[in-house]
Amino acid sequence: MSIHLKLNGTERELEVDPEMPLLWALRDVLGLTGTKYGCGQALCGSCVVHLDGEAVRACVTPVSRAAGRHVTTIEGLSADGSHPLQKAWVELAVPQCGFCQSGQIMTAAALLAKKPKPTDNEIDQSMSGNLCRCGTYTRIRCAIKKAAGLPHE
């Protein structure tokens, strides 16, 4: 089956099983490996991408759900790493191992698109479904606040 979607601003056509998880279409078919496989059960957040601006778990989202829609991956957030979140992540040395960070950034980007000046509670609620085994949660919150132009520790 042919699936048409707009991926990171470019029209794409995929010839894949419509039930294939979007994650595998992105990684294995399209070669965009920034989106990570963590748990495969929508529990960890490593695979978060945007579907029409909404944060979704690509590991459990069938590629057919993306048909005719806009998909943004970490590679499409900014071509040169200049998105305010990416810059804040680097400036505040957020990642340790880095594995979960693309999902963290994509979740944070969806939050800031809806709430440009989120409270600590809103940040914590939005990010609560993204796990970081290295425990960089405090730095993640600070980077989100920095990107939002808010005071941060």
Image (tube, helix red, strand yellow):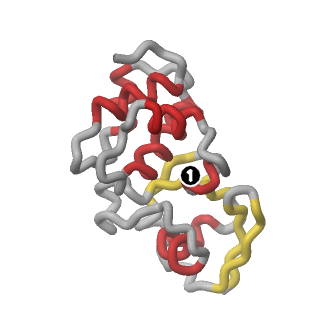
Most extreme residue toward the top, as rendered?
Answer: 151
Judge from the rendering whether residue 98 lies leftward or rightward of residue 134; answer left or right. right
| Residue 138 vs residue 20, the one in the foreground | 138
Image point (28%, 35%), residue name = 137
Provide residue 101's location: percent of width, then percent of height: 40, 49
Image point (33%, 31%), residue name = 139
Image point (53%, 35%), residue name = 87
- Quick check: 131 above or below 115? below
Task: Give the residue pinned by disc 1.
Answer: 50
Provide residue 135's location: percent of width, then percent of height: 22, 41
Image point (38%, 26%), residue name = 142
| Residue 120 vs residue 35, the one in the foreground | 35
| Quadrant in which the N terminus is drawn | bottom right
Most extreme residue toward the right, as rendered?
Answer: 11
* Residue type at numbered disc 1: His
Disc 1 packing (10 Å; few <14; some 14–19; many ≥20): many
- Quick check: 84 above or below 27? above
Q: What element carries label 1?
A: strand
Provide residue 35's location: percent of width, then percent of height: 47, 61
Provide residue 12's location: percent of width, then percent of height: 73, 71
